[in-house]
Amino acid sequence: MNPSVATPPPLPRPQLSSPEPDPADLEPVRGIGGTIEALLRRPGGVLHQLHQSDGSRLVAVMILVATLAAAAYGFIVGTFSGGSQLWAAPLKISAGLMFCGVICLPSLYVFACLSGSTARFVDVAGMVAGLMALMTMLLVSFAPVAWVFSQSTESLVSMGTLHLAFWLIATYFGARFLYRGMARLGARGEGAFYFWICLFIVVALQMTTALRPIIGPAGPLLPAVKRSFLQHWSEQLRSESAKDNPAANP
Amino acid sequence: MKLETPPFPALSCWRCLPELLRGKPAFLREWIEGSGGFRWRMCLAVIVAGAGLFGAAVGWWRSEAQAVITAIKLPCILLLTALGNAVLNGLLAPLLGLNLNFRQSALAVLLSFTLAAMILGSLAPLVAFLAWNLPTVGSAPGSLRVAHGVVLLMTVLTVAFAGGVSNLRLFQLLQSASANRAVARRILLAWLSTNLLLGTQLTWIARPFFGDPRLPVQWLRTDAFAGNFFEATATAARRVFTP
């Protein structure tokens, strides 16, 4: 090996662990509609295309889908309080999700490499974009249910719990997509993957507290007091139970 | 050390990093056996960048000035530990059964620090996010005390994780080079002990990293050279166990 070579020859592209992909996966994924359909029906096709030379274009489309879908779901979240939350909630949810993806991406790439995966940075970025796009599309599909509930309750805790449940279901399917992608690129062992998913979930939950209020009535755009999401939730629970039972908390 | 694997194609700096993380023993061996300043420069750059980013994220909890100070101190500690133990580690390897020369053993130790720095750097955005979300100077004393504990715990866990993974890679490298698990274990333990001894003392001298919020932001404490890490641990243990 000559380590001092100034212009190294190009490396061969890392190989997928499955040498013969499903023929359906080889069909190109094009446009926003095609990307949404591929993420839902043939995620293998998305993962295959991410690995091709035009993978970065697909990453951009998935980020666009995730941003738009998060904003759409955010609008439904904002309808609970109305007013300026109609624009603040979509803005906070889509920006918070993107920020969450960006700060978690470097650790996923390093964990993927530690697991022996041959993934390139753009592959990992694409898988995170796919995770977020799939998550937010599922959230949009839950939006009508969320809207019906938001119009029939005044309880902030009930709405928060409902949104949290929808988000966890969506994250499960997003994580499944990510897991498939990692396995396809040769990652061994599952420990690093599960650890990263836990990190992602905790960061996303904390983001909801860092950007509060998202569901509740509009206040300052960002909070002045810093809290952990667990502390914030327990305070919300206490204040709601005090409202329900004023005699218990004179 | 005998090279049994075919040489790897020359890799650029950025393409080497993921290969080092993947830790294929043959690649790691090739890495320490090859010659040229490229490897040293890359290790240096990654340690400065990775450990620096992590240091900045940790120090940011206290203040921007502390972030800059910790970003400088943390890479310095790693590099000084590697430098200070280079001769000793180079002597220990052949004594314990592996015929590595000084350059190779120094590069192997530096490699494990580089891996740790890469992991720390990748976690730096998450640590910064946590620091941003914690109460800082000016908050109520109770919540400030909890926040200080959270930063301490998070720093210890992150460094332990990065150190654990990088030493696992170092063990794999030593095992591949020696073809003997026992020899690899002996050398790893010896290197770990020497690095731990010097590293903890350098860390002790270089405190604060995020600092007690009641104390001012400083490059070094006024009592930086008073006592050492092990004395302080023993004193703390005595306080806990004696009435």
Image: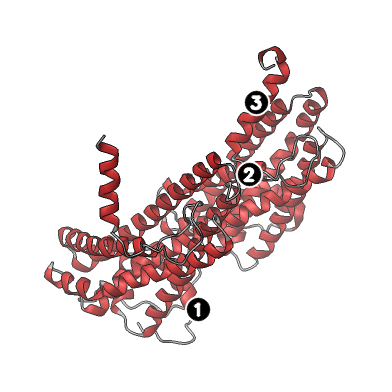
Marks 2 and 1: CB-CB under 8 Å?
no
* Residue B218 badge: none
Give the crowd class for mark 1: few <14, some 14-19, many >=20 residues within 10 Å: few
* Residue that carries the numbered disc 1 in the rendered image: A10
Give the crowd class for mark 3: few <14, some 14-19, many >=20 residues within 10 Å: some
Residue A237 in the image, given as x and y percentages of width and height: 65, 26
| Chain for disc number 1 | A
Between circles 3 and 2, the one closer to the viewer is 2
Residue B100 in the image, given as x and y percentages of width and height: 20, 75
Give the crowd class for mark 2: few <14, some 14-19, many >=20 residues within 10 Å: some
- Residue at the image point whose x is 69% and y is 33% from the top: A163
Taking the image as shown, residue B108 lies to the left or right of residue B60, namely left
Q: Amino acid at mark 1?
A: Pro
* Residue that carries the numbered disc 3 in the rendered image: A237
Work out how far the residue at label 3 is from the one at label 2, CA to CA, in angstroms: 18 Å
Note whether A149 is above or below B185 in the view shown.
above
Q: Amino acid at mark 3?
A: Leu
Work out how far the residue at label 2 is from the one at label 1, CA to CA, in angstroms: 48 Å
Question: Tag 3, which secondary structure?
Answer: helix
Note whether B70 is above or below A95 in the view shown.
below
Taking the image as shown, residue B20 lies to the left or right of residue B218, namely left
**Does mark 1 fall on the same chain as mark 2?**
yes
For the residue pair A34 and B123, the one nearer the viewer reads as B123
Question: Tag 2, which secondary structure?
Answer: loop
**Does mark 3 fall on the same chain as mark 1?**
yes
Marks 3 and 2: CB-CB under 8 Å?
no
Taking the image as shown, residue B151 lies to the left or right of residue A80, namely left
Which badge, 1 or 3, comes first in the chain's sequence? 1
Q: Amino acid at mark 2?
A: Lys
* Residue A226 badge: 2
